[in-house]
Image: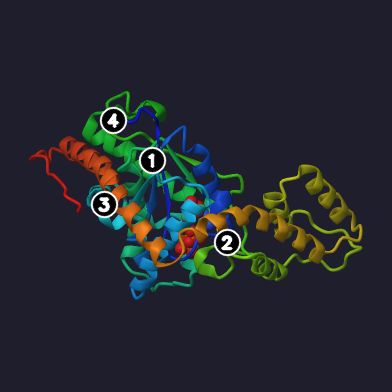
């Protein structure tokens, strides 16, 4: 067993990964790979919350996301990939945790509300949709991580996870409610109280210039996009600017991209100064410069991804997933066993066989 503290985070296979994922979470994952024992989850069960009618797409996206991970530098030799549907302990723990979360608390989650709005779901969502937020508590807690690297939108999901972890520890492990969050395990609790870690850019705006960049909102620059596509998508970015010789707002969506992707600080400062002063620098020009910076970031990713192209690449990914499912199940089964012991569901230890 590794002595390193753990990380758990993940993505829903509702499409391919994009720049929002990179700055919000992927970059941190790559950076923390050596100092933490990392578990990265593909939430393929949760993908069904919004697309019950698209099983083929979900399966395709599941493989594509793993390819994106490897392409952006997540190393399957050092990190463990968790295929949600093949880890039964997660679904079981979801049930137990659902009992510890008030219904109104789940429905009050601001991210859930925003998602319903952005995805135009209205009142027309399944019972499973809000359930995914309870499921996410189980996704996290089953691996007992200290840290959860996520975008800002997901912090609202980590809060109930922290609440439910405290409650479980108090109810079933006899931890005193006055215990500091950092001391729950020391005090006999099964679950650490995990902390969210937001990336360099908390919430990258999409190429519509309004909503969060999102796989399912048609406003994303994907990690696989080529220079031409990047340029085209950015050209549509709304900035609200009237003329080149009028002062521009350096807090607009374009400048969020400038600061996120142009890594030369002196150049960023110069662009900010000239834009704010209305010093004859056009949106179009800056957009091309941003596109070039993004292209430079994505080029090595595209190269690594090409090595996993086609059916051969699919086979390789499936092989990795099968191997990793065994590792992930070992860790998850251990936690579930201990959780059930604590709940007096101590009727013996099962053995899970995954071929
Ligand atoms: P969906 O539209 O299906 O919800 P998504 O694009 O929002 O997809 P998720 O799979 O929900 O992606 O999110 C995966 C991780 O990436 C989460 O930690 C989330 O906070 C982060 N993330 C997603 N979009 C952004 C963004 N635009 N800026 C920063 N972080 C983001
Ligand atoms: Mg999302």
Secondary structure category for the residue under label 3? loop
- Whether ligand 1 has any atom under 8 Å from the Cβ at mark 4 is answered as no
Q: Is residue 17 above or below residue 98?
A: below
- Whether ligand 1 has any atom under 8 Å from the Cβ at mark 2 is answered as yes
Q: What x and y, as percent, mark residue 82? A: 34, 50
Residue at the far left in the pictured view: 347
Which residue is label 2 attached to?
A: 213
Of badges 1 and 2, nearer the viewer stands: 2
Residue at the far top in the pictured view: 186
Mark closest to the chain's N terminus, 1 or 3: 3
Q: Quadrant of the C terminus?
A: bottom left
30 horizontally vs 182: left or right: right
Of badges 2 and 3, nearer the viewer stands: 3
Identified at 36% across, 27% down, the residue is 3
Mark closest to the chain's N terminus, 4 or 1: 1
Which residue is label 4 attached to?
A: 189
- C-alpha span from label 2 to label 4: 38 Å
- C-alpha span from label 4 to label 3: 23 Å
302 horizontally vs 271: left or right: left
- C-alpha span from label 1 to label 2: 26 Å
- Residue 162: which disc? 1
Secondary structure category for the residue under label 2? loop
Identified at 56% across, 62% down, the residue is 224
275 horizontally vs 145: left or right: right
Quarter of the rendering containing residue 174: top left
Sort mark 2 into few (<14), some (14-19) or many (20+) by Cα contacts within 10 Å. Answer: many
Of badges 1 and 3, nearer the viewer stands: 3
Mark closest to the chain's N terminus, 2 or 4: 4
Sort mark 4 into few (<14), some (14-19) or many (20+) by Cα contacts within 10 Å. Answer: many
Which residue is label 3 attached to?
A: 87
Sort mark 3 into few (<14), some (14-19) or many (20+) by Cα contacts within 10 Å. Answer: many
């Amino acid at each position: 067993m590794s002595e390193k503290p753990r990380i758990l985070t993940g993505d829903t296979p509702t499409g391919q990964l994009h720049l929002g994922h990179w700055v919000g979470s992927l970059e941190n994952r790559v950076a923390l790979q050596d100092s933490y024992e990392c578990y990265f989850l593909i939430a393929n069960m949760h993908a069904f919350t919004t697309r019950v009618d698209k099983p083929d797409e979900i399966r395709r996206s599941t493989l594509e996301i793993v390819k994106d991970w490897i392409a952006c530098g997540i190393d399957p030799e050092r990190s463990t990939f968790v295929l949600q549907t093949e880890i039964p302990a997660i679904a079981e723990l979801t049930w137990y945790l659902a009992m510890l979360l008030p219904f109104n608390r789940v429905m009050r989650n601001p991210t859930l509300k925003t998602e319903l709005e952005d995805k135009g779901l209205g009142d027309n969502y399944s019972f499973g949709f809000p359930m995914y937020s309870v499921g996410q508590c189980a996704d996290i807690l089953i691996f007992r991580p200290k840290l959860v690297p996520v975008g800002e939108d997901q912090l609202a999901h980590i809060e109930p996870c922290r609440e439910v972890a405290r409650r479980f520890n108090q109810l079933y492990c006899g931890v005193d409610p006055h215990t500091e969050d950092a001391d729950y395990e020391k005090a006999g609790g099964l679950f650490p109280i995990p902390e969210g870690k937001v990336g360099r850019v908390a919430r990258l705006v999409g190429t519509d210039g309004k909503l969060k960049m999102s796989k399912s909102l048609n406003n994303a620059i994907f990690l696989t996009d080529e220079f031409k596509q990047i340029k085209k998508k950015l050209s549509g970015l709304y900035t609200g600017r009237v003329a080149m010789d009028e002062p521009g707002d350096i807090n607009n969506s374009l400048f969020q991209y400038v600061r996120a992707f142009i890594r030369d600080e002196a150049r960023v400062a110069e662009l900010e100064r000239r834009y704010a002063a209305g010093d004859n620098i056009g949106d179009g020009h800056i957009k091309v410069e941003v596109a070039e910076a993004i292209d430079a970031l994505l080029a090595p990713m595209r190269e690594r991804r090409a090595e996993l192209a086609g059916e051969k690449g699919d086979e390789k990914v499936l092989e990795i997933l099968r191997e990793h499912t065994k590792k992930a199940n070992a860790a998850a089964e251990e936690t579930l066993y201990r959780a059930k012991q604590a709940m007096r569901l101590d009727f013996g230890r099962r053995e899970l066989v995954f071929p």
